[in-house]
Image (cartoon, grey):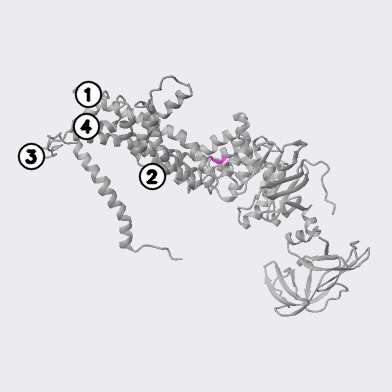
Amino acid sequence: MAKFTIPMPGRRFVIGVPYVWLVLFFFLPFLILLYISFVDMGNSIDPFKPLWDPQTGVLSLKYENYWSIFRRGEGGAMFDTIYIEAYVRSIWYALCTALLCLAIGYPFSYFIARAKPSVRPALLMMVMLPFWTSFLLRVYAWKGILADQGIVNQTLMWLGITKEPIFMIYTDVSMLVGMTYVYLPFMVLPLYANLVKMDFRLLEAAYDLGASPFKAFWLVTVPLSRSGIIAGFMLVFIPSVGEFVIPSLLGGPENIMIGRVVWDEMFTSNNWPRATALAVVMIGFIVVPLAIYYHYTGESAEARQ
Amino acid sequence: MANKVPAEGFLVTEKLAKRFDETLAVDDVSLSIGRGEIFALLGSSGCGKSTLLRMLAGFEKPSSGRILLGGQDVGQFPPYERPMNMMFQSYALFPHLDVWENIAFGLKREGLPTAQVKQRVGEMLDLVQLGQFAKRKPHQLSGGQQQRVALARSLAKRPSLLLLDEPLGALDKKLREQTQFELVNIIEKVKVTCVMVTHDQEEAMTMANRIAVMSKGRVVQVGSPEEVYEHPANRFVADFIGNVNLFEGRLSVDETDHCVATTGIGEVYVGHGVSGKANMQLAIAVRPEKIEIRKRRPDANHNVFTGKVKEIAYFGSYNTYIVIATDGSQVRITEANTARHVHSEITWGDDVHFWWSDDAAIVLRD
C-alpha cells in the first residue's frame, strides 16, 4: 500500500506553521523580555533606555537588574532579598497547591476511570464545567464562602462547632483553597487519561499473587500512573508559581508571591528592567522542573515502544 | 457413560453457579479434579469456562455452590488468600517491573526473607530457562518468553493449584505446538494440579489428562481426550470436538450384538446394541478419517454408500473429500497421504463408494 504523504510545499507549510507561531509569539517576546532585563531603567516617558545609545555611542549593559534580585545593596548578604523570599514563597505555595490537587485529584480520576464507560463523559464534563463560568466569578465566589459571615462559618456556628467565626479569608488557607480549586482539573485530566488506559487484569494478577487491594494499588496502580502524576503535577505547579490573581483576591497582605512582585515593579515602580529580570529568573526556576518532567516522560515513552 | 472420577477429589466444585443479572453464566457445575491432574475446561467463547476459572481464582463470587480445595471451602476467600495462582490470558505481566521482580512479586507479598526470595526466583528462572533475561522488562521479551515469565511467576509461590487461562492463546501456531509440550513438562516436573481454560480442542487434547466440555454454562461431558473424541456423549460434543458427519435417523433393528439405523443415506449397521426403543430418533456420528473412499465397490457387507465428489482439498498430510450422498447430504472424508507422489485416482465429479467398518459409527441419542 502506498504511504500517504503530503506534497513537499504543503508539508513544509504544515510543519512550518507551529514553528512560525512559536517564534512569533513565544521566542521573540522572550527575546524582548531578555533585552529589557539587561538595560537601564528609563524615565516617566520611556520605561527603559536602549542598550546602545546612538547619540553618545555608549553601550550600557546592566547586570544590576539580576544582581539586585539575589543581593540586597552593595555587599549585602546573598539571597537575603524580598525577591528571593517571594520566589521561595511562590514555589512553596505552588508545591502545596500541586500536592493538594494530587491528593484530591487522584481519587477523583481513579473513580472516573473506574466508572462505567457510559457515564465517564458525564463525569469528565462535571470536572470541566466550572471552566464555562468566568474564572474571576468563581474566585470571588470563594470569598463569599470563606468570609467571616460566609457559608462555612455560618454553618459551623449553626452547628455549634465554633462560637466565633474562624478567620479564613485573606490567609494561606483561603489562598490555597482557591488555587487548588482552580487548578484541580489540570491534575484530574492527565491522571484520568493515564488511569483509564490501565489494564485492570494487572490488579487481578497482583491480588492473585497475594497482594491486598491496598498493596496492589500502591505497587501496581501508582507506579503505572507515574507519568500521569508527573504531568498533572507539572501542569498545576508551573502556572501556580506565577499565579497573580488568586493570591491578590484571596491571599493575605503578608504572603506576597512573585507574580505580585513583578506586577508591582512593572506598574507601581515603573521599573521594567527589574520586572523583566524577575520574570526571566522565574522562567529559570520553572525550566528546571520542566526539564525533569520531559526527561521522565521521554524515558517512559521509550519504554512503551 | 461412566466418568472416571479420581477417588479423592483435590479440587471439588459442588453445584457451582454464577448469575450475571439475568444470564446464568455458569450453571450447576459439579466437578472433581484429582491431585496432580491437568484438567481442561473446553468450550467456545461465552460457554462459561472463563467465569468458572475466575470463580476458582476468586475474582468472581459464586452465586451458589461451593469450591472445596483439599477439603477446605475456599469459595468465599478473596483471591489474595487462596493457595492457588493463575497464569493470565496474554499474561498480565507488570510492565514496570523486570522479569526478576515480576517473579518475586508474589514471594515478597508472602513476606519471605530476601535470601529465600532470591533462591526461589533463581530456581524459577532456571525452570523456564530465562536466567539471562532476569533484568529485562516484559516489553523487551518475545511472546514465548513472556509466556514463560508468566508461568514462572504463577509457579513461584508453589501453589497447590495452578490455573491457566488460554495459556497458549497469544502465541502463533508453530510456537504453540512446541510450547504445549514444554508447558506440560514443566507442570509435571513441579507436580502441580492444574486447571486450564481453552477454546482450542487440540490444545486441550494434547495437554490435559481429562477434559470437561462446556456449553451454555453447563458441563456436557467429562472424560479423557480419547473418551470425548471416540465416545462423545451427544451431538454437541461430537460436533465440537473434531470433525464429524452426523446422519439423523431412526432405530430399526436393535439386538444385543448389533443395531441398524435407517438414515437419509441408507441403512447404517452398528456393531453393538443400544437397548433403545424401536423407531426412536437418533443420530449416527462418523469421523471423517474413519470413512474410506474408492471408485470401485468395496468388498464389505455393511455401510457401503454411493455419492459424487464435490470438493477435494489437499492439506499436505491428508486429503479431504466432500461427497454428496444419494440424499443430497454432504459427507466429509479424509484420507492420509501416506505415500509420496501418489496421484489419487479420484477427481471432481466422480461417482464413488464410501464405507466404514461396523465399529466406526457412534450412536447418539441426545
Badge nearest the viewer, 4 or 1: 4
Query: SS class of the residue under badge 4?
Result: helix
The answer to the question of whether label 1 and label 2 lie on touching residues, with beta carbons closer than 8 A, is no
- Residue A238 located within the stretch drawn in magenta: no
Query: SS class of the residue under badge 3?
Result: loop
Percent coordinates x, y for residue B254 in the rendering: 91, 66
Name the side, left or right, on which B56 lies relative to A161: right
| Badge 4 and badge 1 in a common chain | yes
Name the side, left or right, on which B67 lies relative to B304: left
Q: Which residue is mark 4?
A: A265
How many residues crowd around disc 1 within 10 Å: few (fewer than 14), some, or many (20 or more)? some
Q: Chain of mark 3?
A: A
Which mark is on residue A132? 2
In the image, residue B90 sits, relative to residue A287, either above or below, namely below
Q: Amino acid at mark 1?
A: Arg
Residue B128, visible in the rendered structure: no
How many residues crowd around disc 2 within 10 Å: few (fewer than 14), some, or many (20 or more)? few
Q: Which residue is mark 1?
A: A72
Q: Which residue is mark 3?
A: A57
Which mark is on residue A250? none
In the image, residue A64 sits, relative to residue B325, either above or below, namely above
| Badge 3 and badge 1 in a common chain | yes
Q: Chain of mark 2?
A: A
| Residue occupying image coordinates x 77% and y 73% | B293
| Residue occupying image coordinates x 45% and y 20% | A162
Inter-mark Cα distance, 4 to 1: 16 Å
Quadrant position of the N terminus of chain B in the picture:
bottom right
In the image, residue A130 sits, relative to residue B204, either above or below, namely above
